[in-house]
Amino acid sequence: MTLDISMVTFDCTEPERLARWWADAVAGEMTIAAPGEFVTVASPQGLRLGFQNVPDPTPGKNRLHLDLHSHDRVRDVARLIAAGATEVSRGEASADFGWVVLADPDGNVFCVAGAP
C-alpha cells in the first residue's frame, strides 16, 4: 500500500487572504472550497497548497517548510518581499548555491534556493 501526498496545508485565520498571497507567489490557481474555511492553491508544477481556518494557529516556528527553487534568486526574493514576505536569514552552501529564508505575511517560513 502506498500513500500519495495530496497537498501541504497551512493553519491560518484568514485562508482566502493567505491563499491569494501564495497563489501570486507561485503563479498558482486559487480555488475556494469552503468560503472562509478552506482554500486551495494549485501550482503550475502540480503541488497543491491548502489553507484552513483555525481559531488559534500553532505558535512558534513551523516544523516543516516549503523549499522553492529559483532561476533568479535575487529577483524572486525581491518580488516576494515587495509582496509582503519578510527576510529571516540567508545561507550559502557554495558560490553557486545558496538560499534565503523568508516568512509569508502570516509568519510561515519558507526557503528560496538557487544560484544568486
Image (cartoon, rainbow, N blue to C red):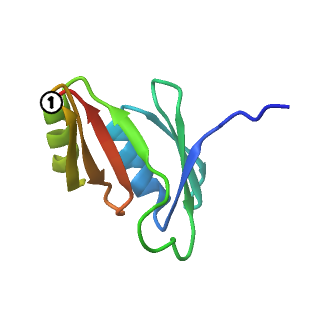
Quadrant assignment for the N terminus = top right
In the displayed structure image, the side of residue 66 where residue 100 appears, left or right: left
Residue 60 position, x and y percent, is 42, 72
Tag 1's secondary structure? loop
Looking at the image, residue 107 lies above or below residue 51: below
Looking at the image, residue 90 lies above or below residue 43: below
Residue 62 position, x and y percent, is 45, 61
Residue drawn where x is 40% and y is 56% of the image: 17
Residue drawn where x is 21% and y is 54% of the image: 89
Between 72 and 37, the one lying in front of the other is: 72
**Dot 1 alpha-carbon crowd within 10 angstroms: few under 14, some 14 to 19, many 20 or more:** some
Residue type, label 1: Pro
Looking at the image, residue 82 lies above or below residue 12: above
Residue drawn where x is 42% and y is 33% of the image: 28
Residue 73 position, x and y percent, is 19, 32
- The residue beneath circle 1 is 116
Residue 15 position, x and y percent, is 49, 58
In the displayed structure image, the side of residue 115 where residue 104 appears, left or right: right
Looking at the image, residue 26 lies above or below residue 45: below
